[in-house]
Amino acid sequence: MSASVVLQQMGVIVILVAVGIYLYRKDVVDNVTSRKLSAIVMLFCNPALTLSSVLTGNVNASHEELLEAILIGVVFYFALMVLGGILPFLLGAEKSQRRFYNLMTVYTNVGFIGIPVARAILPDKAILYVIVCNVMYCLLFYTHGITVLSNGREKMNLRKVFSAGTIMAVLSLVVCWFRITPPPIIASSVTHMGNATVFLSMTLLGVSIARSDLSKGFKNGRIWGYILLRMILLPMLTFFVLRGLHCPPIAVISVCLMAAMPVGNLPLIQSEKIGEDTELLSGAITVTTIISMATITILMVWFTSIMGSVI
């Protein structure tokens, strides 16, 4: 995979996001339509994209490679939880906002943005590491995540761990492990649903950007500090650590892409549910998402220029 391929694919994503901005400003997609389309993407398209990625037959992973992907994912998220406790202090965050920066550090958008972007710019086998990251995300958010957000007041919700995305991600790993080949009618249906994900998710991302108040987020210096430390330096550090540990090139580039994702939506949704002030999270999601189009492109071009010949 060459740097030119990354630039081309990220350019496609930028165009799709621009389509979403245009549709919102022309009132083709309003807030109600956006919510309904988001539900379709989260309940059907994104999970289907995950499963269809392994049903193509292009993901040929041995049991050792699957176990290695799971181990890397576990270690990566353990490191994120540790960093989540440290980063708020590095940023000089106020005590009342430290838990939000903690969540922003651990729970980035590895699903809604991560899966489509990975499918667009990485080889098919990379989806294994993306799937593992999504499983870890869901397992941790409704346990560790809500505990951090509520300062221990709210109990872990194990039932919510088993969302459509988690179930489909685990099923995808099972399909890989046992090399299951479903009937063509099932595989084709899942593939068609999955194929809608990239366009819909990137368009909805454009809608989200178009309706946001950008000024407050862009004026927040700590959000820029977060971008530097979490979205630029951390992926770079991850790259050199994984290379130093002689991890497979596809694992290195996949995990680094996941490390470069912008702030995810679940912390915001959960905060709204329990009546927290969501101004910081809302601004961070908007700003990091916009900036990630540049940072992801630059980082992936750099990484692939170093490793492109072996990916």
Image: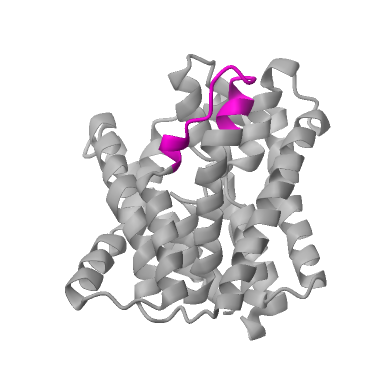
Task: Give percent across and percent down for residue 111.
Answer: 46, 51
Q: Is residue 127 above or below residue 108?
A: below
| In the image: residue 224, left or right of residue 172 | right
Q: Nearer the viewer, residue 282 or 275?
A: 275
**Image quarter of residue 72:** bottom right
Query: Is 113 within the magenta?
Result: no
Q: Is any atom of residue 298 visible in this view?
A: no
Task: Give percent across and percent down for residue 208.
Answer: 40, 37
Query: Is 151 within the magenta?
Result: yes
**Image quarter of residue 248:** bottom right
Residue, x 30% and y 62% (percent of image)?
194
Residue, x 21% and y 39% (percent of image)?
28
Q: Quadrant of the N terminus?
A: bottom right
Q: Nearer the viewer, residue 153 or 47?
A: 153
Residue stretch rendered in magenta on the structure: 145-161
Q: Is residue 214 above or below residue 180?
A: above
Task: Give percent across and percent down for residue 151.
Answer: 64, 20
| In the image: residue 191, left or right of residue 14 | left
Q: Nearer the viewer, residue 220 or 170?
A: 170
Name the residue furthest bottom.
309
